[in-house]
Every structure is written in structure tokens, then in C-alpha cells.
């Protein structure tokens, strides 16, 4: 089934111990779309400036991403410049130019409003909520968020959580959101805030999944070749939502498999700079890694 | 089968956000023994001072730990005082008095030398090696180590790793030992140093197991009630070695189960101050948690 994503499109300049990539295609919705398209058809709602090149549009369109919801506004595209630490477990933002993304008011095209699966990439909770309100009757809506919104737009975020099915956060964010320092306690407490599903990303340590019906832990895919962690979280979300959108049922078993597909998709992303590796991935690579991850979990 | 452990016995003073415990029974070999005795018979080689109370001996002996290898020397017992950070993921040592443990030269009693399973708790590699050399023909020898020895006694440690079957280290230690910043690469590189089995502990994130035949990831038991992390690593080792010593075969499946039993045993330890919870644990509690951990891993 069709999957709608709303989020940023950007030019990223990325420095990691493995090198530097300048002004490459980035943004949460880009990583998400390129991950999700491995599993299902994707509709993209985003905004770019007049400097956004046709080559980038073509890269997305060639992979089946419907760009009818990508608005081009006067001015420049959102630009980000970051540098990772030696172990790549933390990063410093050197420059951010919000540009046309600064006052992004997502408009979901009429033809997109029947999308049953919706992902709200990181953004102001009020903006995310405005998307929910534009949809007809989505079956499964999941949002990402970040420390900034938990701190500065807490009420808006809590209102959003009442309206959606799932939330994807990292370990620090779920502790901040719930005020619990124990991760298991924090995950359970987040469920009390509304969503039926809470996914806690732990980077190289994998993820936890909390629902009222099951708790589940999955390690990260055991990659030895992390080149650039940018977009790992959005690729995870893309693999998760993409796989799920293609399932007949939202069963617990399918949710679990979807988490593993998200994990695998993220592992491809981090092995190249920007979207390079992800854009050239195919379903065969994904399935091979899915098998390897299952073996890593089951051991013998 | 019988399991021999060689390591420290101590008085611990512990401060965590949940309170303070003064001069309680501690030390690597104590936690290990109290964990392992849940599965098999344990022989202890350690040293204490004349101030070591009979009550502590009784606590161990009552749980089937054979204390024939515990030497009492003139002077005081090793004493440690530490304080944990608010999230309990790091700790500061406020005071260490090595006392009688300072020049510990473990002497394995004649009647202990036929022990098929041996655990060398954290200590100077040369001291650990001296134990290996006192044994008849052990079937499975595993050692713990720490950053101090990796830095100051690297050659001795590398020599030890050639003589033993397995090593248990934490994530920082395996990176330091191998010079690899990626944990998967580090685990594999550690295998090249000699041991057939490398277990990498990641605290609240569980552990990785590396062998030439399989790689395996297991999350920590999802406890919400961490009161005092002291001894978690040694309890993990005790549960792992204790379960394995009681198995007929050193099969991969048994190794995997042993890692899960170690995980579960450690989870009991951290729910109380010092050895309190561990000393009062029984096999029923362990089995219940083993089932819960398996459910956490398999999800539905």
C-alpha cells in the first residue's frame, strides 16, 4: 500500500573520519524515501529551493518516488554541515541554513490524501499535526521527533502523540520525553502518552520496540564498515514503514519483521557517504542482510 | 562439573543514586561464586585479611562454595569505595586499599587442580597465567581483564590469551585491546589473538559473542529496577561459566544458553546492593527470567 512521507530535503556537507562529502543530497524525507522505495511505492511531501538540481529529482523519480508533493519555492534549499567524532557516535553541527525549509507548511496534494501509511519525519509537532489533519483516514501514522521539540514544544508533541499510532525516538529522547532514566521504564512510560508503538533507536546497539502486547529487542546489523552515520535513523524508519506498508496485516510478527528490515536498510546507508549506498541498494541486498541479521540474533 | 574461580574478595562501600552500602561483602570472586553456585559446584581461590568475618564465610559455604582455597593472611581484607553517576553508567573510585590482595599469589590447593572449568577473574595477567600453570588439564579456561592490564601488561596479556579458551571483556576494553574502533571488527580481531571465544559485555545494551563458528548478539534482561551495578560483570561470568560447567557438551547451543544465563544472573545482582539479591536468588528465579529474556529476544 502507498506510503506518504513528509519531511525535509537538504544539501548536506558531511565530515567523518573517512572523508568529506560536499553539498550532497540529504534531508530526512530523502533518506526515508530511498529506503522505503525498496519495499513499496512512496509519495513525498517536501520543499526545496530554486537551486535544487534536476539530477536529484531524477534520482528519486527513477526509484519510483512520487514527487508531486515537492514544492519549489523562491530561495535556496535547506543546507546542513556537520562533523562526526572519531568513533562517529556523536556529531557537531557546523552550519545550518534553513532557507526555504524555515517556514515549511506542508500541503498534502489531493491525490496523496488517501495514503494509508504516513510517516512524519522530524519537524515541529504543530507542523506534523497539520499533516495528520489533511489526511483522509490513514491506517497507520508514525512520527519521528527530537530533543528540541521535546524541550520547546512539549504540549504540541503530547497532543500529536494522542493522534498517531507510533513514535520513533532515540534512547536519549525517550528518557527526556518521559523523565525516566531507565530505558525499559522510559519505553513503557512513552506508551502511556498515546502511541500504540514506541520504537527506541540505540544506534550501534540496535533498538527496543515497546507495545502493550510485546517488548522486543533487536541488535544492529553487525557491519564493520561505518563510513557516514547520516540518515541512519530516517533509513531505519523508511525500511520499517516501507515493509509494513507492503504487508497485508499489521500483525505483531509483521511489525517485528519490519523492525528488522529497518535495521538492515539503515546498515546499508551508513556504509556510504550520504545516500550513495542506499540509492544503489536493491531488494536482494536487503534480503541477504535480513538473513544475516536473523542469524546474528539466533546464533547457531 | 566442578568450576574453579580465582579472584579478589573485598569489602565494598558503594554509593548509588538509590543509597549507600558500607563495607559489604564484595570482590570479583565473590560475585562470581554466588552466581555460579546457582548452576554447579564452585571452588574458590582467593585471599582475605584477619578482619574477614565468619558470617561472610558462612554465607558462601552455606551456598556450596568450597572455601579451601581462601587464604587468610595477616593484615586487612582488600577494600574498595566507589560512587556511581546519576544514570549509573559510570563510576568513580573514591578509595582503594589493596591490603592483603596487594601481593596475591594464588595457590591452587592440590584437591582443586583437577577442576575442568576455570575462571580467572580480573587480575594481573602474570598472576592469571600462574593459575593456568597450576592446573592439571582444564577443559575450558576463561579470563576477565581490564584497561589497566591492556595498557600496562600487554605482553603478559597476549601470552595469557594464547593459553586460554575464552575472554570476557567490555566494549571499551576490546577496542583498546585490538585498536579497532568498530565493535564488530574489534570482536573478530580479538579472536585472532588466541581465544576461541570472545564475549563483549555492553552493560545495559547486552553482549556480543564472537567465535570462529558463530557471532551472536543478546540484549540485557529488561530490568527496570537497577539499584547497584557493582558485580554485574562477574555475576554474568559466573552464570555463564556455571551453566556451561553443568552441560555435557561445549556445544554452540549450550554456549548461547550459557550467555543468556549469565545475562539473567547479572540482572538479579543489579537489583540489590552488593551481593544481597544474588545471595538470595534461587534457580527458580533464574529460570523465570531466562524465559522472559527469550521472549524479549523473540518478541511474539
Image (spheres, coloured by chain):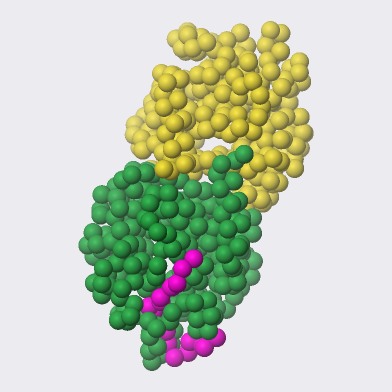
Chain colours: A yellow, B green
Left or right placement of residue B205 versus residue A270 in this view: right
Q: Quadrant of residue A194?
A: top right
- Which percent across, then down, holds residue A271? 39, 30
Q: Quadrant of the C terminus of chain A?
A: top left
- Which percent across, then down, holds residue B268? 58, 63
Q: Residue at x 52, y 33 (%)?
A: A260
Whether residue A297 appears in magenta in the rendering, the answer is no
Using the image, determine if residue A295 lies above or below residue A135: below
Image: magenta residue range? B39-55
Left or right placement of residue B163 versus residue A78 in this view: left
Q: Quadrant of the N terminus of chain A?
A: top right
Q: Residue at x 66, y 50 (%)?
A: A185
Q: Quadrant of residue A45?
A: top right
Q: Nearer the viewer, residue B82 or B74?
A: B74
Q: Residue at x 56, y 48 (%)?
A: B294
Using the image, determine if residue A205 lies above or below residue A141: below
- Which percent across, then down, holds residue A266? 48, 30
Whether residue B48 appears in magenta in the rendering, the answer is yes
Using the image, determine if residue A1 lies above or below residue A145: above
* Outermost residue to the front: B248
Amino acid at each position: 500500500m502507498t506510503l506518504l512521507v513528509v519531511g525535509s530535503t537538504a544539501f548536506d556537507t558531511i565530515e567523518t573520519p573517512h572523508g568529506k562529502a560536499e553539498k550532497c543530497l540529504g534531508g530526512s524525507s530523502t533518506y526515508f524515501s530511498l529506503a522505503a522505495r525498496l519495499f513499496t511505492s512512496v509519495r513525498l511531501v517536501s520543499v526545496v529551493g530554486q537551486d535544487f538540481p534536476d539530477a536529484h529529482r531524477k534520482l528519486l523519480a527513477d526509484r519510483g518516488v512520487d514527487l508531486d508533493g515537492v514544492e519549489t519555492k523562491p530561495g535556496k534549499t535547506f543546507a546542513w554541515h556537520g562533523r562526526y567524532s572519531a568513533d562517529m557516535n556523536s556529531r557537531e553541527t557546523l552550519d545550518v541554513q534553513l532557507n526555504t525549509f524555515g517556514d515549511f507548511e506542508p500541503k498534502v496534494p489531493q491525490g496523496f490524501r488517501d495514503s494509508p501509511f504516513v510517516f512524519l519525519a522530524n519537524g515541529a509537532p504543530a507542523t506534523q499535526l497539520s499533516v495528520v489533519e489533511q489526511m483522509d483516514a490513514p491506517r497507520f501514522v508514525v512520527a519521528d521527533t527530537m530533543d528540541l521539540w521535546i524541550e520547546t514544544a512539549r504540549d504540541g508533541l503530547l497532543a500529536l502523540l494522542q493522534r498517531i499510532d507510533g513514535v520513533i525516538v532515540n534512547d536519549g529522547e525517550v528518557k527526556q520525553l518521559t523523565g525516566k532514566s531507565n530505558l525499559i521504564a522510559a519505553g513503557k512510560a512513552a506508551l502511556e502518552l498515546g502511541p500504540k508503538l514506541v520504537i527506541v533507536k540505540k544506534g550501534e546497539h540496535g533498538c527496543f520496540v515497546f507495545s502493550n502486547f510485546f517488548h522486543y529487542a533487536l541488535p544492529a546489523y553487525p557491519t564493520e564498515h561505518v563510513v557516514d552515520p547520516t540518515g541512519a535513523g530516517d533509513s531505519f524508519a523508511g525500511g520499517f514503514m516501507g515493509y509494513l506498508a507492503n504487508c497485508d496485516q499489521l500483525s505483531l510478527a509483521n511489525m517485528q519483521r519490519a523492525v528488522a528490515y529497518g535495521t538492515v536498510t539503515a546498515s546499508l546507508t551508513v556504509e556510504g557517504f550520504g545516500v550513495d549506498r542506499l540509492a544503489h541498494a536493491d531488494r536482494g541486498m536487503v534480503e541477504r542482510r535480513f538473513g544475516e541479521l536473523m542469524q546474528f540474533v539466533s546464533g547457531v
